[in-house]
Image: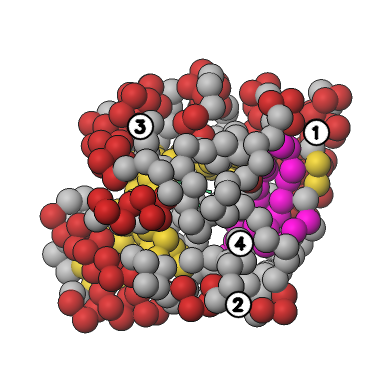
Amino acid sequence: MELLDGFNRKVNYLRLSVTDRCNLRCRYCMPAEGVAKLDHDDILSYEELHCVARAAVSLGIEKIRITGGEPLVRKGLIPFLSELSKLPGLKELVLTTNGILLPELAPDLKAAGVKRVNISLDTLQPERFRPITRCGDLAQVLAGIAAAEEAGLAVKLNMVVMRGINDDEVVDFAAMTLAKAQSVRFIEYMPNIQDAGWQEQVVRGEEILARIGEKYAYQALSRGALCGPSRDYRLDGAAGTFGIITPVSSHFCDSCNRIRVTATGKARSCLFSGEAVDLRPVLHSGDMPAVQRALLDIVKGKASGHHLDEESERGPAFSMSTIGG
Ligand code: SAM
Ligand code: SF4
C-alpha cells in the first residue's frame, strides 16, 4: 500500500520518539539549563508506541527510526524493539543514538532486529566533546561505535557542523571514510533553540562540499528508495561514503517522505511546522481505525515545505530532544 500526501509525495518513513530524556545536553539541541523532564504518565507506554507503529505500517510506512531524547536510556526498550521488528510490512528498523550506552546494548539491539544505528559524533577531539555536549566524554562514544560494529550493526555517523565550533574537522571526518567502509553525514546546524546569531553558525552544505573538494576528489552517488534527505558522495578510492543534509540552505521538502510522533504522542508532519495532533485520546480508546485515521489526516495535511532560512517564518524555539530530530 502506498501512502501519498496532498502533494503526491510518498510517505514511507516514521520517526518515533520513545523518550524526551537524555544523558547529554548538546548545545545545538537544548538550552544550557536542559529541558524540564516530562512526567512518566505523559510519555506513551510501549503498548501505545506499538499501536502507533502498527497503524503506521498498515498505512504504508516501511521504515521506522527510533529516536528521542536518547532512546537507549528508556528501560524496556529491547523487548519493545523485538516486537516492532516483527511487524509485517516493516522493511527497516533503525535507531538514532548518542552512542554512550552502546557498549552495553549493541548486541541486544542487533538481536532485537535493529538494522542500523545512526550515532551522533560532532568532534574527534576529546577536549571539544564536553563543550559541545556539556557532559559525557568522547571515549564513551568511540567505544559505542566499536561495540556497534562488533555486534554487526551497520553504523552511520552524524556530525552537526557549527562554524567556529567544529567546522574545521569536516575534512578529518570525510577522511575517515577513506580506509573504513564508514558512512559519515554532515548536517547543517538548525535554529531550533533560536540562539542569537544562529545564521553565522550555519555552514551551508555547498561550503562543506567545497572544503572537502579542496583536499579530495569525490563523486556523487544515486539515492535508494528508503533514503533520508542525505545527498551522498564517495571520495575517490574510498571504502566508505559521506553525505550532506541541508535543511537550512536547500530544503529537501519536495522529496520529504516522513512523519514524526513524539514521546508524548504528538504526531507532526514537519519538524518546523509547529502543528501537532495529539494521538493520545485515540490511543487511550484502543480504537485502531481511529489511530489510522489520525495518522492519515497528518499525512494528508502535510505542508509543501518550510522556510527555515527566512527569519520571518520562524516558529517558537524548541529542544530537538522533545521531538526526536
Ligand atoms: N540522542 C540521539 C542523538 O543525539 O543521536 C537521538 C535524538 S537527537 C535529537 C536526533 C538528531 O538530531 C541527532 O543526530 C542530532 O545531532 C540532531 N540535532 C539536534 N539538534 C540539532 C540542530 N540544532 N541542528 C541539526 N541537527 C540537530
Ligand atoms: Fe541528547 Fe541527542 Fe539532544 Fe544531544 S542531540 S542532547 S544526545 S537528544
Q: CA distance from mark 2 to mark 4?
A: 12 Å
Pick the residue in front: 202 or 107.
202
Q: Nearer the viewer, mark 3 or mark 1?
A: 3
Q: Is residue 307 left or right of residue 67?
A: right
Q: CA distance from mark 4 to mark 1?
A: 25 Å
Label placed on residue 192? 4
Badge 3 or badge 4: first in the primary sequence? 3
State which quadrant residue 46 falls in.
top right
Secondary element under disc 3, as helix, strand or loop, is helix
Taking the image as drawn, is residue 247 in sight? yes
Q: Which residues are magenta?
A: 252-275
Q: Position of residue 255 (x, y in %)?
A: 58, 65
Secondary element under disc 1, as helix, strand or loop, is helix
The type of residue carrying mark 4 is Asn
Q: Nearer the viewer, mark 2 or mark 4?
A: 4
Badge 4 or badge 1: first in the primary sequence? 4
Q: CA distance from mark 2 to mark 3?
A: 35 Å
Label placed on residue 280? 1
> Label 2 belongs to which residue?
309
Mark 3 residue CB less than 8 A from any atom of ligand 1? no
Secondary element under disc 2, as helix, strand or loop, is loop
> Label 3 belongs to which residue?
102
Badge 3 or badge 1: first in the primary sequence? 3
Taking the image as drawn, is residue 60 in sight? no
Pick the residue in front: 174 or 302.
174
